[in-house]
Amino acid sequence: NLRVGILTGGGDCPGLNAAIRSVAKTLMLTSNAEIIGIEDGFLGFIERRSRPISYQDCSGIFALGGTIIGTCNRADPFNYNGRDCSSEVKAYYDQLQLDALVIIGGDGTLSIGYELSKLGLNVVGVPKTIDNDLMCTERTFGFDTAVSIVTDAIDRLRTTGQSHKRIMIVETMGRNAGWIALHAGVAGGADSILIPEYPYDIQRVAKACTERMGSHHFSIVVVAEGARPVNGRVSVRENIAGSPEPSRLGGIGEQLKVQLGQFMDAEIRATTLGHIQRGGSPTSFDRIFATNLGSYAAKLVESKQFNRAVIQKGNRLSHVALESVANKTRNVPADDLTLQTAIAMGICFGTPNL
Ligand code: F6P
């Protein structure tokens, strides 16, 4: 019988359990495979922790957030506390008598998978991240859920912002890409969307907010955590007399609040949504998408197509060399439909940084 390991690595995201379930159930039903869950990402390999996953274990988990086998984003076997543990990972893979390992992860996790494949592990990669910033694939699961959580937050911030006649800044996750901010900003009817791909001119943002305050008496600004002003990072400490210590200054949302405050005397509040964007139940889209990806990965294992990553383009799934998705990220391209729409509607502005 086939023995297949499953590992989830890096930051969690909604849809991981749906993917685990479909990898496992597909392999069990079509190949009578035994499934081994590696616990807490690559840490489980390093610390030799795993457990069998039964058909029953996979029942009813598709709607659960997080990952039933745990994850960890500080356990690179090639550099674990300064030590190369990759041969130990290979030894544990052999000890478990695995025929293949399905790795569900983002660019960092998949690139570790690629390096391990060079040591002889049979790896199949499944891309995931709320950031939607992986190469070769148009979508990653987790993104739709994050966008819907941020959209809901914007809807809520609008009613309180409107009541108090305030400027409400919403900081989203997304690392160095603006996908979440752009999509949730458009879905939530934001007045200004600031993304890393288009460094912003603070005076333009202030002008847009001032005009909006004049006409509607409130404004919503969505800023991606990776967004920066045109001239690089503005040091908030330089802008606040008797500034507090840096740890109290917060991220770009808080910085933007201070920057905007220099140009207008409106009340401004900043909300950082943080890990809420990664928690809880996946949307129906992410459940279906993760299920399709997982089942496709299982078929790659069954047909012995190793060291490949599943990708999605249009309405089709296919696969590419793991190497093509390893350690590379994808920003919002200039010709992205939603970006073009946002620019045309005057809600996303800045100087292209691509
Ligand atoms: O990659 C997913 C992500 O949530 C990013 O959007 C964010 O920058 C990062 O992970 C946060 O990482 P951590 O959970 O380690 O704080």
Image (tube, grey):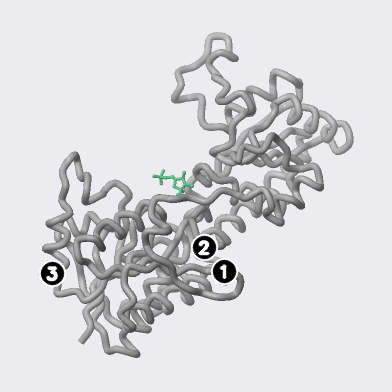
Displayed quadrant of residue 87: bottom left
Quadrant housing the C terminus: top right
Label 2 sits on residue: 137
User: Mark 3 vs mark 1: which is more N-terminal?
Assistant: 3
User: Mark 3 vs mark 2: which is more N-terminal?
Assistant: 3
Q: Which residue is drawn at 10% across and 69% down?
A: 95
Displayed quadrant of residue 202: top right
Q: Residue at x 42, y 79 (%)?
A: 295
Q: Is residue 253 left or right of residue 85?
A: right
CB of mark 1 near ligand 1 (< 8 Å): no
Displayed quadrant of residue 227: top right
Confirm or deny contact between disc 1 and disc 2 (CB under 8 A): yes
Q: Is residue 293 left or right of residue 218?
A: left
Label 1 sits on residue: 313
Label 3 sits on residue: 94
User: Mark 1 vs mark 2: which is more N-terminal?
Assistant: 2
